[in-house]
Every structure is written in C-alpha cells, then in structure tokens.
Image: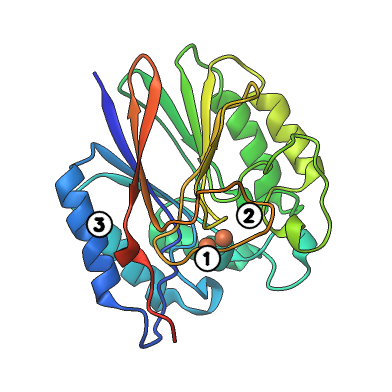
Amino acid sequence: MTLRLLQCSDFHLDARPHDDPRRMEVVRQLVQRLAPDLIVFTGDLVELGPQDADSLRRGRDLLASFGCPFYALPGNHDVGNKLSIGRHVVTEPAVGQWIDILGNDRFVCDVGGWRLIGINSQITGSGLARERDQLHWLQSALDTELPIALFSHMPPYLYQCDENPTGREAYWQIDPEPRQHILHLLDSPNVRLVASGHVHWHATFNHDSLPRLWCPACYSVVHEPHYPPGGNVTGMVLHTLDSDWTYELIADEALSRPQD
Ligand SMILES: [Fe+2]
Ligand SMILES: [Fe+2]
C-alpha cells in the first residue's frame, strides 16, 4: 500500500479579525483535492494557546471537519516555548490543556508499512516529568523493523547535528542537550525521515544520514538570513510513503494571512 500523508503546519489561528476564514477555506479545498489518507499537523495550531482554549477547540474542530484522519502535535504557540527561551515557556498546565482538547501531544501508528511517530518537541529540555516519560516512550516506539517517519514541531537541528547557536538563531531548533538524547535514539537506518514545522520556510536536507524536511506554514513566511534559498512559500507537503519516501510541495500564496 502507498500512503499519502499530508503534512500541514503553523495555522496560528486566533480571535483577531485578520485571522481569515478564507485562509482556512483554502486549506479545506486543498485537502479535498489531494484526498490524503492521513493528515499530520506539526504544531502552532493557534497563536496564543495557553491563554486561548477557545481557539484550540476551533482548530481541533477545523481539523476534524476536513473528513480525514489526523494527528496534531503541539508547537510553541500552543503550549509554550522551550525552556531556554526564557519567556512564555512551556508549562504542565498548558500541555495538559492541549491534551484535554486535542487528545494527545504525541502519537505512534503503523500504517502503509511504515511506523509514524510524532513527538512533543516543546517539552524537550523542560525538566517536566513528561519529558522523561516521552523519551522512554520514544525508545519503545522506535523499536521496529518498519521504516520510520518522525514528526515534530521544532526540528532537532537546522543544519548540523552538533550546532549550538545563540541569540535569535537558537529559537528554531531543539536545544543541544535534549537533542543528543533524541538523536541517539534516532540513530537507526530505519529512520527514513524527520519532518517538522516551526521555521515557516521550506527545505529538505538529504546530505547526512538523517533525511529532514521543513514543512512551510499555512500562515506566513519567516525570512532568516541563514535559511536555504527558495523556501519562501506558504503551503503544505504531500508525503508519499511506500518502498521509498518522496514528497510534493503544495505551495499556495493564498495561505498567507493578510497583513494588518
Ligand atoms: Fe509557527
Ligand atoms: Fe513555532
């Protein structure tokens, strides 16, 4: 069986007037046209999640209304920033709220001859009890002979597995120490793909042992001087998983929110 998996990310829904239903209608039409077997949403469903449960519920209902099975992972705007950012950081109540509304903050499933795994990247480095729990869970989830695709909001790293940036560049990836724990677990030829959101840019990296993909946002493009050229799109990614992994970028300017 060939699995057609639509990854979408970074809706950033909120209650502001410019959060247009038109943008979500474009998402709906794309889902209908592409008719994927499964949707994986990789975080930032809403803009101000910890204070805005109503938007989280609206985002959940929106995803459910597409008529396609889905898994949703939390992003920093849903449950808080990684601890090292120092402001609006992830908290246990915020993760609990996400789980109450969306059902879970991680997933594992076997479908189409692949094992799909989603993790909550926001708790990495948090020291919360659920971070340790997730690592144990991830270790057992990775124990399979099936090819594995792993999804998260933050990518484990941007360019180098040992990168340790400072300042603004440190916003975009899992911190070095928790990253090493995760990469240690991912060190298997069965891991064929790590796909993330968060960066609001599209890129793929196939030059090292861990093929990685950045899914663009359905919201805005973020311009960082170090980003690889050509990824300045809004859109989604249609993954095709069979004996190999291939993908198609579904770029659509209509997925940009209007400027204020
Ligand atoms: Fe985002
Ligand atoms: Fe994010």
* Three-letter amino acid code at the position of disc 3: Ala
Q: Position of residue 217 (x, y in %)?
A: 44, 58
For image coordinates 44% across by 87% down, the residue present is 260
Q: Is residue 178 above or below residue 97?
A: above
Q: How many marks?
A: 3
Which element type, helix, strand or loop, lies under badge 3?
helix
Q: Position of residue 111 (x, y in %)?
A: 32, 25
- Compare residues 161 and 89 and report the one nearer the observer: 161
Identify the disc placed on residue 122. 2
Q: Earlier in the sequence, mark 1 or mark 3?
A: 3
User: What secondary structure is found at the residue carrying circle 1?
Assistant: helix
Residue under label 3, please give it.
64
Q: Is label 2 in a helix, a strand or a loop?
A: helix
Residue 225, located in which quarter of the rendered image? bottom right
Nearer-the-camera pick, 200 or 146? 200
Q: How packed is label 1: few (under 14 Cα within 10 Å), some, or many (20 or more)?
A: many
Q: Earlier in the sequence, mark 2 or mark 3?
A: 3
